[in-house]
């Protein structure tokens, strides 16, 4: 049985369309997040109860920390660092997350890592503040 060239061409085009469509669907549904290796999630989250100094040690490298954090969205930050100790809402859809750095509250000043998110949900500013 011999296929006509016209039918063969239609079949090949159909297979190409199905392949492209399935590739598009697969690429949109797979997770685009990558595992962050520069921060230990469990150490960060347990710092305030265990007082190991991990947060202070990490914030001493603020330049490299800023570089890494500015590539993340709000959901990625909360997945990695947990919920913030304080959330501040700002104008035009911007917000701030504050994470306490030092684990002792008996000090007169506490250090906080403040992350500012733009209206699209990306980190655009990283500050270390004392109050």
Image (cartoon, rainbow, N blue to C red):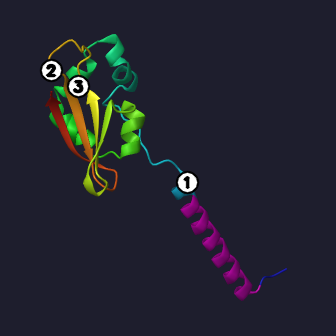
Asked if the residue at tag 3 contacts the one at tag 2, i.e. Cβ–Cβ closer than 8 Å, the answer is no
Residue 79 vs 119, above or below: the answer is above
Which is closer to the viewer, label 2 or label 1?
A: 2
Between 74 and 2, the one nearer to me in the picture: 74
Q: Quadrant of residue 51?
A: top left
Residue 1 vs 6, above or below: the answer is above
User: Which mark is drawn over residue 109?
Assistant: 2
The residue shown at (25%, 40%) is: 115
User: Which mark is drawn over residue 29?
Assistant: 1
Image location of residue 128, percent across then percent down: 16, 32
Which is closer to the viewer, label 2 or label 3?
A: 2
Please tell me which of labels 3 and 1 falls first in the chain.
1
Q: Which residue is mark 3?
A: 58
Q: Quadrant of residue 64?
A: top left
Report the magenta stretch's main SS.
helix
Residue 16 vs 46, above or below: the answer is below
Write down the region rendered in magenta. Answer: 4-25
The residue shown at (28%, 30%) is: 99
Image location of residue 2, percent across then percent down: 81, 82
Magenta residue check for 21:
yes
Magenta residue check for 15:
yes
């Amino acid at each position: 049985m011999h296929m006509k060239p016209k039918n063969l061409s239609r079949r090949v085009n159909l297979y190409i369309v199905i392949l492209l469509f399935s590739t598009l669907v697969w690429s949109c549904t797979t997770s685009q997040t990558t595992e962050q290796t520069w921060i230990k999630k469990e150490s960060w989250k347990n710092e305030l109860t265990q007082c190991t100094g991990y947060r202070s040690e990490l914030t001493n490298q603020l330049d490299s920390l800023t570089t890494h954090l500015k590539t993340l969205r709000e959901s990625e930050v909360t997945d990695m660092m947990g919920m913030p100790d304080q959330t501040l809402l700002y104008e035009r859809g911007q917000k701030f997350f504050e994470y306490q750095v030092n684990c002792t509250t008996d000090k007169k000043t506490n250090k906080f890592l403040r992350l500012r998110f733009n209206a699209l949900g990306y980190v655009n500013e990283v500050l270390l503040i004392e109050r």
